[in-house]
Amino acid sequence: MTTTTTITRRSANYQPSIWNHDFVQSLKSDYTKEIYTKRAEKLKEEVRRMFFDIEASALSSSSSSSSTSLLKLINTIQRLGVSYHFDDEIKGALDRIMSTSIQDKVAVSEEDDDQDLFTRALKFRLLRQHGYEVSQGDDDDDLKAAARTVVLLNKLDDVEGMLSLYEASFYGFEGEKILDEAQELTSRILKEYLNNNNNNNNNNKGNKNYIKQQLVSHALELPLHWMMPRVEARWFIDTYEQMMIMQQQDHEACSMVDPLLLEFAKLDFNMVQAIYQDDLKFVSRWWEELGFTEALSFTRDRWVEHFFWSVGFHFDPKFGNYRRRMTKAGCLVTTIDDIYDVYGSLDELELFTNAVERWDINLMGGLPHYMKILFLALYNITNEIAYEILKMRGLDVIQHLKNSWAHLCKAYLVEAKWYYSGYTPTLEEYLENGWISVSGPTLAAHAYFLLGTETTEEGLEYIKNNSSDLIRSSFIITRLVDDLETSRDELKRGDVPKSVECYMHQAGVSESIAREHIKHLINEMWKKMNQDKFSRSIFPRPFIDTMANVARMTHCTYQYGDGHGLPDRETKGRIMSIVVKPIPISS
């Protein structure tokens, strides 16, 4: 006699995709035309000439104004999203600024006007951002001097200087108390500045301080170092244009605003957007053909959001193939996550984990139908990516890729067992598993090979053994930021306790205290990643940048709530502005 066991399936009631394949396929950009590419090349040369003009003026002057002008130019083109065109010029400029700083250390005094708070903090931030070995400072060094300027010279009304120091403080390492104190002080003063101006109704666009208030408000929401570069570029292009309008009205309001630079930023943004649209059309065709929307309808249908993640990982137009393949990996991660979190029974999950770990197509026979579809898709897509890498680069990476999927599924299984047994882990135990279950080793392995940069034996060992502090720090940030915004909803649908709940249980504290502790950990992990990122890494720069961008993309996605699970909120608007809608350019 045969008995049939009925499995009670949980449901997360995920929202269907808000994106339509026909809409995506209909996207068309005018900015692929030759007239725009020629204009962009001409403007790029004009911007390049700005570097030469500033340095030429420096030869005829002994003041530090040329260094300040270079720093401001670098900062502006970075925020406008066009710095990738000027890597050599930026490196040359920063090399000279660094050399000058070493030769000419000057302590701050009341008479020292050449190196003001704004400039000192900006110089520190840009040098550290680009990997130069700069200290937070001894008694006579720049950042300590900048912090002392605030207190000793009583420059608490120097909002631009405060904002510059605030942004610099997020590049701190573990144990750099000066930067910790600077961050605490500047955060408090900038918040007071905003409150005072809001109370005085000084927030209309015609007000001279309007731009300053917008810059402060924007920074307090999310510091520049934590911001997704493409979202920042889109916001700053609008802000820079407003600066230009105010400059035309008041020549003292916003110096250093250049109409040609603004035009180039807009044009470049729209040209890159046209490339994203082609990438997204590819993803649309692939996802529709894969058929998960119908075959696995209980999982999240987030192909556009995953493409947006890939743009966040690396926005440079030359990484189109990388974005397309990383989107495939991301879509698989979310689908597998939903099966382990909600849909699969524990017995089924153990069977699936075993099949992935052994990477054996013959084990499909023991899987339920929905898992057969998922396993075969995972198997084929991973082998396809490995084949492309082998064909293009001569690297056999299949073992590394399949191991990364096995690590992910085993981490998911650990959490499933916690759920079914009612176990609440310690925060440390949760994070040791959680940075893997948030797809750390999986996405890192794919990124390492798909970027097309040089691989080393040491790098391969780190990927194989999940032993990179850089990768671990990035994905612990991802785990914690995700948890802060999604844990309540996930607990309601029957998920494992997240970091907030684990710490509440472990320390016996309230939810509000636990949340503050998690925010503190996020800040500390950024410091650790800063140090890992700027130390002599065995990883190539594009991969290091990707790991930082993973954390930035997480902040972006969960800045206003669950932007991945509920993407009809702020996420939709950001995708529209980055991928769909070009920036208007007046003729």
Image (cartoon, rainbow, N blue to C red):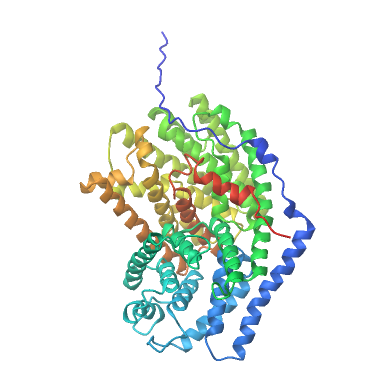
Residue at (36% x, 41% y) in the render: 487
Q: Nearer the viewer, residue 66 or 439?
A: 66
Residue 30: horizontal and vertical position, in percent? 74, 52
Q: Is residue 112 above or below residue 196?
A: below
Q: Nearer the viewer, residue 523 or 389?
A: 523
**Would residue 288 appear left or right of 334 to someone viewing this image?**
right
Q: Is residue 182 above or below residue 54?
A: above
Residue 145 sits in quarter: bottom left
Q: Residue furthest right?
A: 34
**Would residue 463 appear left or right of 380 to someone viewing this image?**
left
Residue at (51% x, 84% y) in the render: 99
Q: Is residue 495 above or below residue 345?
A: below
Residue 279: horizontal and vertical position, in percent? 66, 47
Q: Nearer the viewer, residue 17 or 371?
A: 17
Residue 305 sits in quarter: top right
Residue 182: horizontal and vertical position, in percent? 35, 70
Task: Report if residue 361 is visible in the image.
Answer: no
